[in-house]
Amino acid sequence: MPKHPHILNAASTLLGIALLIITGLHVSRYSANSIADEIAWGAALSLMLSCLFSYLAIRAEPLQSRYEGLADSVFLVGLFLLFGSVVVLAIFNG
């Protein structure tokens, strides 16, 4: 069973969460005092790339493509960056 549809679903949801963190930090004016928003931007970029690679894997569905592996790897990077952003926010602003 291919995993790229699941990666697309999870990556797009986490992309929304990353953008919500970035927006919340800018609205509350914590972005100037913390690097959490920069880390969240890295997570958003990684998760956006994961969405793109997962979509390309779906488009190339009958054929085997390398996009699924790329989507999976970039998704994990984005997931860890998002976690790091929340940890930095919780430790240094909590």
Image (cartoon, helix red, strand yellow):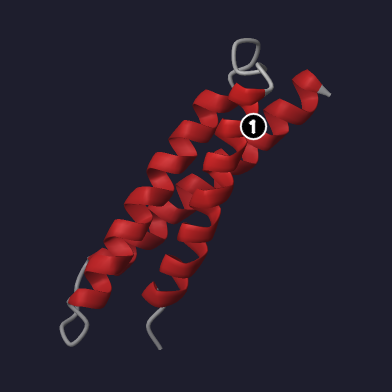
- Position of 42 with respect to 61 (left or right) is right
Query: Which residue occupies the extreme front position in the image?
Result: 27
Residue lying farthest to the right in this orientation = 94
Please tell me how many numbered marks the rendered image carries.
1
Callout 1 secondary element: helix
What residue sits 40% from the left and 45% below the top? 46
16 relative to 7 in the view: left or right:
right
Q: Residue lying farthest top?
A: 33
Name the residue nearer the viewer: 78 or 29.
29
Residue type pointed to by label 1: Gly
Circle 1 Cα neighbour tier, 10 Å, few/some/many (<14 / 14–19 / ≥20)? some
Question: How far from the left and from the top, in percent, is residue 35?
Answer: 58, 19
The percent coordinates of residue 62 (x first, y second) are 18, 87
Horizontal and vertical percent for residue 21? 61, 37
Q: Quadrant of residue 14?
A: bottom right
> Who is closer to the viewer here, 90 or 16?
16
Look at the image and tell me in which quarter the C terminus lies. Answer: top right
In this rendering, position of residue 32 left or right of residue 75: right
| Residue 49 in the image: above or below residue 72 | above
Could you tell me which quadrant the N terminus lies in?
bottom left
The residue under the point 50% across, 24% down is: 38
Give the residue displayed 53% in from the left and 34% down from the top: 40
Q: Quadrant of residue 68?
A: bottom left
Relative horizontal placement of residue 74, taking residue 64 as reference (left or right)? right
**Which residue is painted at 27% across and 76% down in the image?**
58
Q: Which residue is mark 1?
A: 24
